[in-house]
């Protein structure tokens, strides 16, 4: 067995374990919010060849392989694939601005169930990549660091910020209880609207 193939197998194993740990953590968070279907289906596209093989090639362990692919190629093929199939990413909701107030592209309002899943995703990613350095403020700090650099719709940004700030202030138990109550009320509202 060549050294290159051994490294590939090692990366494949570690990448699989990283995305699986992340998926399980997001699933646990989604279940805590009452988003059972989303918890089960979250990020399944990462296991398909388009995303998985790139993840193996650029696996580093302490950050997303997408960042390494972007540095190497100037584009992230796995990310382009991923964001187009997973509604919990704000980039899924970017479209042409028909009002032309902002120019060509703008963020669209995300349905609340995907905002809550995005919150669950950000908390899980912070835990996976920060490990022992994770605190309840980690996901908020990461979000604030990138604020203004994304096309997040104002409604979606307000809801996500509320959840991240609540987590930083009140901790996981209270924040996930709040999110579950919110999702129950949101579902009742949607049913009445039909």
Image: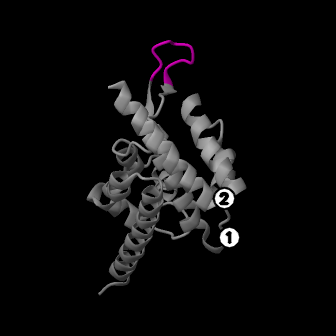
Comes first in the chain, label 1 or label 2: 1
x, y percent for residue 184: 44, 44
Quick check: 122 above or below 146? below
Q: Which residue occupies the foreground of this view, 54 or 125?
A: 125
Q: Residue furthest bottom?
A: 1
Q: Which mark is residue 116?
A: none
SS label for mark 2: helix
Q: Nearer the viewer, residue 46 or 31?
A: 31
Pinpoint residue 127: horizontal percent, then vertical percent: 57, 66
Q: Quadrant of the N terminus?
A: bottom left
Position above or below: 7 against 109: below
Where are the magenta residues, as a range? 96-105
- Label number found at residue 138: 2
Q: Nearer the viewer, residue 131 or 8?
A: 131
Q: Residue at x 65, y 40 (%)?
A: 147
Quadrant assignment for the C terminus: top left
Magenta region, main secondary structure: loop
* Quadrant in the rendering for residue 22: bottom left
Coordinates of residue 50 in the picture (x, y in percent): 30, 55
Residue 113 drawn at (x, y percent): 43, 42
What residue is shown at x 32% (from left), y 53% (from top)? 37
Image position of 194 with respect to 87: above or below: above
Q: Residues within 10 Å of mark 1 (few under 14, many from 20)?
A: few
1 and 2 marks in contact (CB < 8 Å): yes
At mark 1, the secondary structure is helix
What's the CA distance linking mark 1 and mark 2?
A: 9 Å
- Residue drawn at x 37%, y 25% is 193
Residue 133: mark: 1
Q: Nearer the viewer, residue 35 or 188?
A: 188
Judge whether residue 89 can be spotted in this image.
Answer: no
The reply to whether residue 131 is in sight is yes
Q: Is residue 89 magenta?
A: no
């Amino acid at each position: 067995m060549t050294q290159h193939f051994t490294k590939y197998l090692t990366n494949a194993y570690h990448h699989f374990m990283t995305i699986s740990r992340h998926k399980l953590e997001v699933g646990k968070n989604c279940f805590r919010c009452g988003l059972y279907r989303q918890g089960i289906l979250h990020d399944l596209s990462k296991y398909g060849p388009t995303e998985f093989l790139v993840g193996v090639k650029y696996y580093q362990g302490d950050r997303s392989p997408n960042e390494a692919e972007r540095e190497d190629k100037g584009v992230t093929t796995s990310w382009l694939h991923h964001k187009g199939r997973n509604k919990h990413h704000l980039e899924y909701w970017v479209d042409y601005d028909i009002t032309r107030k902002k120019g060509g592209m703008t963020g669209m309002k995300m349905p609340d169930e995907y905002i809550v899943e995005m919150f669950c995703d950000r908390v899980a990613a912070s835990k996976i990549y920060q490990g022992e350095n994770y605190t309840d403020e980690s996901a908020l700090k990461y979000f604030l660091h990138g604020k203004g650099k994304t096309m997040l719709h104002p409604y979606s940004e307000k809801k996500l910020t509320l959840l991240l700030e609540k987590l930083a202030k009140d901790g996981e138990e209270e924040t996930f209880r709040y999110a579950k109550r919110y999702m129950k009320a949101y579902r009742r509202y949607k049913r009445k609207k039909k």
